[in-house]
Amino acid sequence: MLLPLLTRTLDWSSLHKHYIAVMLWGRLVCFGIWATCLLVGCSGPPDAQLSSASKLNPNLGIAEVPGYLGKQFTSRFDRCIKVMAPNGKPIHIVAQSNITDEQMVRCRNILTHFLTDYPGSRFGHDKSAIANRMADNNAILALLDGQDDGKNTTDVPAQYLFENEIQVEGHPWYIRQDYEHRDAAYEEILHLVHDFGIGVDGPNSMPGAASAFQQEIRAAQINGLRQGIWADDERAMEWIKELAEENSLSQEYLASVIDTYYGLWGAWEEGEGGMWGLYDAKVREELPSKDSMGHALMDEAFFHPYLTYEARIDSSFSGLFSLVLDPSLPYTHHARYLKNIAFIGSHDVDIRVNHLDNNITGNKGSNAAYFSGKQEEYQIQVQGDLVIVVDQVKERDGANRLRFFEYVQFSDELVELDSLKMKDTSR
């Protein structure tokens, strides 16, 4: 993870410090481990765990840390969640005690998003080989308590992500886009996918499944350094030297591009560009002009233009959650790329839809969906608890599937959905 260039004293030598250990360890994994994985998933002998049954949440897929990961994991982590690769092997996410269930689920969501096929793309139309390679390389994401300040001395062969840098949609850190708790989940989880799945050319790396894609990533990274698009700061010179020695330059460059692509720096006001000022482009719209080769990596190559996972809006949130970019709402720089939403908890929560075809599930409170146009400009279909609202104006509000919603607010009228459901039942 990168520390802010403009607001903190930098220790470039500490950045990316776990990469070599992780890579070397991955090469030593015994294939016999995976026979056990196929049988038990995220479970293991009860006496091998730190976790208490009261902290587990099977409804969310949160289970005990499997004993076959070894004492170094079972003694330091108390819960586990996983993504299953097509070959039937798990990619584990292990968590320490302060990590919330929702933080674990969001990390799984992001990993699943990166591994979701992107039909028609050049390198992502079938990502099964990448997911399989991650599982074969024993990729593990470790969610650690606290922050990356050296106080948490956990040392395990895994990609690290800290508690204080995992935002959850709807949580105050997310709503404020609090850069003291900046959302590093995309960066660190992308590192996991890049190192263990896509693959990195050169030394200190493991076999990957997308060497042609990595060639383009490497070319864009080299161009980024030469043209001063990325890491063009004299304070980063020692860090860049260390990354070059570790063969981690392409990973850090790609993370800068992806953060900009998904809107994670649009709300940052302390400097120009993204990734603490290390990267020229701050928002997606700037990529074509500021980093054309980086833009090519995003343009129907591997990464979806929107976020494919279902975002669970934190139970603490109430009010209107917007999927439309609004500079007065910092989180919308990122939320505009969401399309699948689930409200949890019992607060009254409304939503303003974007131009995508959204799937939105309400909660125990009262829920209303806000649309841009007049009621007559939409088709409304009622199918039990499902209401489908389709905008007849192209590229405006899309087709929205609403479950467990009470109201739909158009620009000229508020529609109570119970009345529509009663009419549908009476037919």
Image (tube, helix red, strand yellow):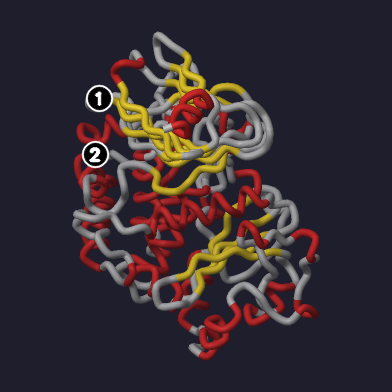
- 177 relative to 205 in the view: left or right: right
Q: Amino acid at mark 1?
A: Gln
Q: Nearer the viewer, mark 2 or mark 1?
A: 1
Task: Look at the image and tell me in which quarter the C terminus lies.
Answer: top left
Question: Quick one: 408 or 230, which is closer to the camera?
Answer: 408
Whether residue 230 is situated above or below residue 210 in the rendered picture: above
Q: Amino acid at mark 2?
A: Asp
Quadrant of the image occupied by residue 317: top right
Residue 365: image location, x then y, percent: 65, 30
Whether residue 407 is situated above or below residue 208 in the rendered picture: above
Q: Please report the residue visible at 33 percent of the width from the left and 65 percent of the height from the top.
A: 198
Residue 211: image location, x then y, percent: 25, 68
Q: Please report the residue visible at 55 percent of the width from the left and 81 percent of the height from the top.
A: 37
Label ID, residue 291: 2
- 364 relative to 222 in the view: left or right: right
Q: Please report the residue visible at 57 percent of the width from the left and 59 percent of the height from the top.
A: 160
Question: Quick one: 283 or 327, which is closer to the camera?
Answer: 327
Label ID, residue 392: 1
Residue 17: image location, x then y, percent: 54, 60
The 10 Å Cα crowd at callout 2, few under 14, some 14 to 19, many 20 or more, is many
Q: Please report the residue visible at 68 percent of the width from the left and 71 percent of the height from the top.
A: 65
Whether residue 400 is situated above or below residue 393 in the rendered picture: below
Question: Quick one: 10 or 60, which is closer to the camera?
Answer: 60
Question: Quick one: 409 or 94, which is closer to the camera?
Answer: 409
| Mark toward the start of the polypeptide (2 vs 1) | 2
